[in-house]
Amino acid sequence: MKHLILSIIVMSFLSLSLSAAEPLNVGDAAPKVKVPNHLGKTTNMNSLYKKGPVVVYFYPRSFTGGCTKQACNIRDNWDALKSSGVTVIGVSDDPVDKQKEFVNEYSLPFILIGDEDHTLGKGFGIPTNPKGAYSRQTFLVIDGKVAWRDLKASPVTQTEDIMTALASLKK
């Protein structure tokens, strides 16, 4: 009996650590949800998709090493992204107040989503760890559909990878 109970507990833990469906594939429709941003307002993702290309990048936690590098990589290359007409949205399950602090601390010129209830993450099929933190993944949405994805996004080459993807899609 003890082994059966232990097996059930282990299986439950494993299913939690591998939560979420498969990430969206290229060609899939991006989720058209409304989510809270660091400005204390609601971001309507569907409205953003209608304005042009949108980069949606998911990261584990604000103020951690890799996540800070990733956000600052985008910030430091903001002019190139902006001139390409791209809107950038960063997403973690951190509270909106923490996202606001992160934006202010590092002078980030883009919107951060506090996806505490995982609405946007579930829509994109982003896996989480047992503590709920997202895995690092990036999507480029054009005309409401995933045009490119990076399921192992690099914090230090994030902008370069996005710009390469944009260039290859224009060919």
Image: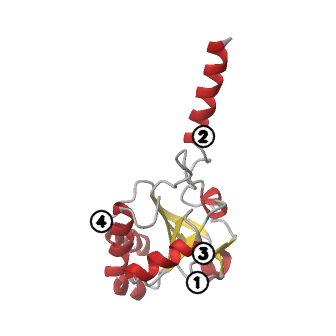
What's the mark number on residue 143?
3
Q: Secondary structure at mark 4?
A: loop
Tags 3 and 1 touching, CB below 8 Å: no
Residue 49 lies in what quarter of the image?
Answer: bottom right
Mark 2 Cα shell of 10 Å, populated few (<14), some (14-19), many (≥20): some
Question: Real-space Cα distance between discs 3 and 4?
Answer: 27 Å
Q: Nearer the viewer, residue 19 or 56?
A: 19
Q: Which residue is mark 4?
A: 156
Query: Exactly how many numbered labels are in the figure?
Result: 4
Q: Secondary structure at mark 1?
A: loop
Q: Position of residue 139 (x, y in %)?
A: 50, 65
Where is 25 relative to 11, above or below? below
Q: Position of residue 27 (x, y in %)?
A: 58, 61
The answer to whether any part of residue 144 appears in the image is yes
Q: Which residue is mark 1?
A: 39
Question: Real-space Cα distance between discs 2 and 1?
Answer: 31 Å
Q: Report the mark closest to the observer, 1 or 4.
A: 1
Residue type at the position of mark 1: Leu
Residue type at the position of mark 4: Val
